Amino acid sequence: MNGYIINGGRRLGGRVRVHGAKNAVLPIMAAAVLSGDVCRIYDSPLLSDVIHTVKILETIGCSVSLEGDMLKIDALSADRWEIPEDLMREMRSSIIFLGALCGKMGKARLCSPGGCELGNRPIDLHLKALRELGIEIREENGFIEASCERMHPADIHLSFPSVGATENIILASVRLKGETTISNAAKEPEIVDMCDFLNKMGADISGAGTEFIRIKGKASLHGAEHKIIPDRIVASTLMCAAMTTKSEIELLNVRKEHLGAVVSVLRESGAKIEFFKDKMYIRAPEKALPADMIKTQVYPGFPTDAQSVVMAALCYSEGTSVIVENIFDSRYKIIPELKKMGADILQDARVAIIKGSSLRGARIRAMDLRGGAALTVAALGAQGESRLEGIEYIDRGYVKLEDMLNGLGADIVRV
């Protein structure tokens, strides 16, 4: 078994540092290709998704090395525009290389991406937007081929503020002569982080973090150094671990402005949360209150990636909570596993009704990244031993989650 053995019922205490954001480092790694130069990315988390992305970079001709938490990407020799199917199938975010290759090589060939199965996550928005830039895209037998000979600037309106589509448009157009605009753009902090990095490389991008982004193309870019923002979902996970164990802990390397929606829910549940510069303190209540209604939304609304860990925390509240999942239609795979632990959850389509109760240890299995983290959080507060399988999903987004939690006093063994 590749999993965790978790002995629950232990209170946590102390401090832990939040590592760099998975959802920021991956598009930034793709963006480094556009420099045609050497880039250094600091606080880069050594995740399995990062390792897969390194393999993609090496496939297209980059030289990559990792020194501590510093990722060095040398794109001087990057000249290949095809990505093998096996690498594309490893993770969903690999689709970001479509925009990067179009922007650097003027063409691309790759297959539809893989990743966690969270229901319908079409890339139609990506392809439609790139076609508006004049990119000719042909889809055949599961492969996507793009040719940029007739590429031109455009004013693109997204019907939905997709993070991936916003990133792909930016990467494809950042070196394109003329001005491209995106309306109804995604506002996530990870978008802002990628644009900050690109601007350090010599790009001219304004409006990141708002619904209207303007890209003034530059013929060439150069190398840059950049530090990745803290991972807001890792921070949310650790906060929820404090809630299920009725603990008080301190988190280092956090940004208050990125955590507002989750902090609001946990405060509603009775947590005391304080921020001090780049760190925060959370003290969970002895008797957690339920949350009346949580609706996942695009940023700055409640993040779908934090929904599972908050559900795990609400299982321990005294009362009934309601969650509405508006982003991914298969985000509730965790519910049958929580029920094995004694959770009282009723699901009707996108709505989950959680009646708080005490949980007990059980043999459970992660079905996706965030669900795996949530089951870990649930098991920490449960009475008895839990055996969690499928932790390879967790490794995609958390750097040794068990070490972070054991450092706070948890009892988790990786087997």
Image (spheres, rainbow, N blue to C red):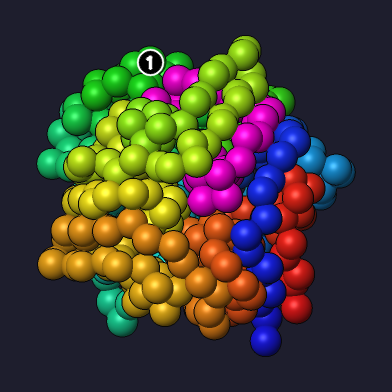
In terms of depth relative to the viewer, which is nearer, 42 or 116? 116
Give the residue at x 67% y 39%. 19
In terms of depth relative to the viewer, which is nearer, 327 or 139? 327
In percent of width and height, residue 209 lies at 36, 22
Residue 408 showing in the rendered view: yes
Q: Quadrant of residue 220?
A: top right
Q: Residues within 10 Å of mark 1 (few under 14, many from 20)?
A: some
Image label count: 1
Q: Badge 1 is on which residue?
A: 206
Q: Eyeballing the image, is 214 above or below 28?
A: above
Give the SS element for disc 1: strand
Q: Quadrant of residue 95?
A: bottom left
Give the residue at x 52% y 36%. 284
In percent of width and height, residue 191 lies at 43, 32
In terms of depth relative to the viewer, which is nearer, 292 or 124? 292
Give the residue at x 68% y 81%. 2
Among all residues in the image, which is located at the extreme top?
277
User: Does the segment drawn in magenta span residue 255?
Assistant: yes
Quarter occupied by the C terminus: bottom right
Q: Is residue 254 left or right of residue 339?
A: right
In percent of width and height, residue 308 lies at 39, 56
In percent of width and height, residue 266 lies at 40, 35
Quarter occupied by the N terminus: bottom right
Q: Is residue 190 left or right of residue 328?
A: right
Residue 393 showing in the rendered view: no
User: Does the segment drawn in magenta span residue 303?
Assistant: no
Q: Is residue 271 left or right of residue 57?
A: left
Give the residue at x 56% y 44%. 246
Amino acid on which the number 1 mark rests in the picture: Ser
Which region shows up in magenta?
238-261
